Image: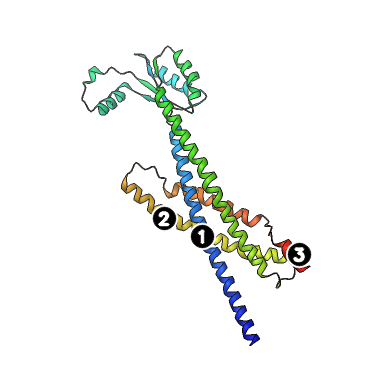
Amino acid sequence: MNNINLMQMEKNTTKNKVQIKKTTFILTILSFIILNFFLAFFINVDSVKKKAEAEYFFTADFQKNVSDEKKEKLEIEILKLEGVKRVRYISKEEAFQKLQYQLDVAIPKAENPLSDSLVIFFDKPSNIEKIQVKLDNDENIKEVFVDGEYINYKERELRFYKMISVGLVVGCIAPILALIYYVFYSAVSIDYINNVGLVKDDKTNRERAKSVNLLPFTAGSIIGTLIFFNIYIYLRHQLLLISNRYLVLSLKEIVFIQFGIIFIINLLIWLKPIKIGVFKWVEDGKQ
């Protein structure tokens, strides 16, 4: 009878161990799906933020009858100024064509009142003044147009995106990383405790408890990431069907960044020594 009870207890113990490993593996997969969701959200917000940063610009109109050589020379000089990202030359014909399209009217070319101009894209509003001084002192420039209202709007937009980015890191990504580590730590701790009486050497038991959980952790991270990629492709497709105005990055634009982050997480888990908080309790219990 005692032997039957012992066999039943051993069977239940084995069953519980398997169940714990299954639960841990599923939690790891789910955690990485959620982590990848927040990472993709962060990468997309950062991409929109960079696009918004690239949209700071103002225009400078040329005087009439300025030669192409002088225009090119000025364009090169402006490009060398600190804070200037790029410069685009717009002929008066191109500007006139755009104006007609915006107004949805046909105007004879002979009545074109516009001038050739430069559109100057810059990093941040603090760079405007020194760029503007250079242009104001150039005899080939008739007038500089700076839309203060537009620039203020862009600054507010950038602050909004930065706030979202910080919120994602602090409120979402950091907590899910802590959860992932806690799940792995718990799996190692449970494995260690279950083998205290079976593995005599404490150091060996610690190393064994970590090593047997490394491959399941890595497998769970890869499976979770691959599942997320499939969900991402589907959701992106649905959003683009609703409207092509949604600025959602394609999979190939995020895949290497996200796999790189997952690789770093795995590398840290594999290389970082883990301290199990039950060591002292177990040792005291033996004494």
Return the mark for residue 284.
3
Judged from the image, the secondary structure of the residue bearing numbered disc 2 is helix
Question: Could you tell whether 241 is left or right of 199 in the image?
Answer: left
Real-space Cα separation, disc 3 to disc 1, in angstroms:
36 Å
N-term mark: 2 or 3: 2
Q: Residue at x 41, y 29 (%)?
A: 153
Local crowd at mark 3 within 10 Å, few (<14), some, or many (≥20)? few
Rendered location of residue 205, percent (x, y):
70, 66
Count of labels in the image: 3
Whole-angstrom CA distance, mark 2 to mark 1, is 14 Å
Residue 6, given in percent of the width and then of the height, sits at 64, 82
- Of circles 3 and 1, the one toward us is 3
* The C terminus, quarter of image: bottom right
Q: How far apart in space, not on screen, are marks 2 and 3 (Cα)?
A: 49 Å
Q: Please tell me in which quadrant of the rendered image residue 101 appears.
A: top left
Looking at the rendered structure, the kind of residue marked 3 is Asp
The amino acid type, in three-letter code, at marker 2 is Ile
Residue with the mark numbered 2: 231
Determine whether the residue tagged by mark 3 lies in a helix, strand or loop: helix
User: Dots 2 and 1: beta carbons under 8 Å?
Assistant: no
Q: Nearer the viewer, residue 236 or 81?
A: 236
Q: Is residue 245 above or below residue 77?
A: below
Q: Residue at x 48, y 15 (%)?
A: 133
Badge 3 or badge 1: first in the primary sequence: 1
For label 1, the residue is 29
For the residues labelled 2 and 3, say whether their Cβ atoms are less than 8 Å apart. Answer: no
Q: What residue is rendered at 50% in x and 44% in y?
A: 168
Residue 63 horizontal/vertical position (percent) = 36, 14
- The amino acid beneath tag 1 is Ile
The quadrant of the rendering that contains the N terminus is bottom right
